[in-house]
Image: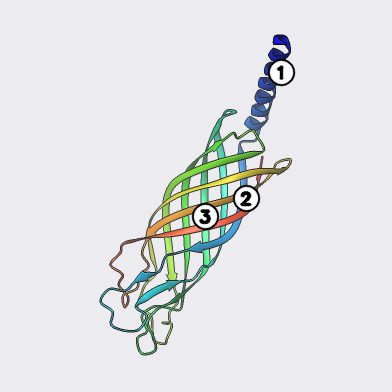
Amino acid sequence: MFGKRFWIAVLSVACLLAASAVAQDEKNEIGGTIGRTFISDQGIKGSTFFDPIIHFGKGLSFEGEYAHRFLVTPIYAVSGEALLMYNRDIDLNAGAYGFSVVPGDMKSLFVTPAARVNLFPTTAVSPWVSLGAGFGHFSESSQLIYGGTNTGKSTTGFVLQGGFGLDVKAWRKLSIRGEVRDFWSGEPDFPLAPTGKSRQHNFFVGGGAFWRF
């Protein structure tokens, strides 16, 4: 009985080492995800008009990612990743006719290099966490939602990124991914709708796939 258990243990370790060796040869990955970005509503300071709250739409968002693994073991892997997340259409709403204070829509772009740690990277299912920093850019439409010229300007600033997700191997070098990331950015420029805040959370929830090579 002892001998049988011993050889089972040896075989298990051999399989893990073999999987780790394969993973060492596949150090790069490239992929993309699609999802939605959620931004919490924000109150407008000193407002006296109807609906003194900025409502942010859940814009359809796209994320591209390239990563390189620097360290791989059967228990964990450490990667450097380059992220680009683009939210193409954030609908805005606040104020009322006669009190037009925000543009009708805006766009956001986040570029954040990051470090990622995967658990059990040589298995079919691997959870992970990510942390990084970079910059974010907001561009606004030129017209206010209820008419008039938008005096706000496009802004670019520092962004922190933190996220977690799950990778599932689908076929050969192809894997699928589900993820949640928070891009903690500066506030857009709304001179007619001051919120009193300097930072905001942009929660991206999405799913996609990547190819490892």
Amino acid type indicated by mark 2: Gly
Up/down of 54 relative to 165, above or below: below
Residue 15 visible in image: yes
* Residue at mark 3: 84
Considering every residue shown, the one lying at the far front of the view is 1
- The answer to which image quadrant residue 126 occupies is top right
Picture residue at 44% right of the left edge, 51% below the top: 161
**Image spot of residue 150 (x, y percent):** 38, 80
Amino acid type indicated by mark 1: Ile
**Image spot of residue 120 (x, y percent):** 59, 33
* Residue at mark 1: 8
**Are the residues at dot 3 and dot 2 in contact (C-beta closer than 8 Å)?**
no
The colour scheme applied to this rendered structure is rainbow
Residue 71 visible in image: no
* Horizontal side of residue 16 vs 155, given as left or right: right
Picture residue at 37% right of the left edge, 67% below the top: 188
* Residue at mark 2: 31
In the rendered image, which quarter contains the C terminus? top right
Picture residue at 43% right of the left edge, 73% below the top: 55
Up/down of 115 relative to 136, above or below: above
Q: CA distance from mark 3 to mark 2?
A: 11 Å
Picture residue at 37% right of the left edge, 72% below the top: 153
* Horizontal side of residue 88 vs 31, given as left or right: left
Q: CA distance from mark 1 to mark 2?
A: 37 Å
Q: Nearer the viewer, mark 1 or mark 2?
A: 1
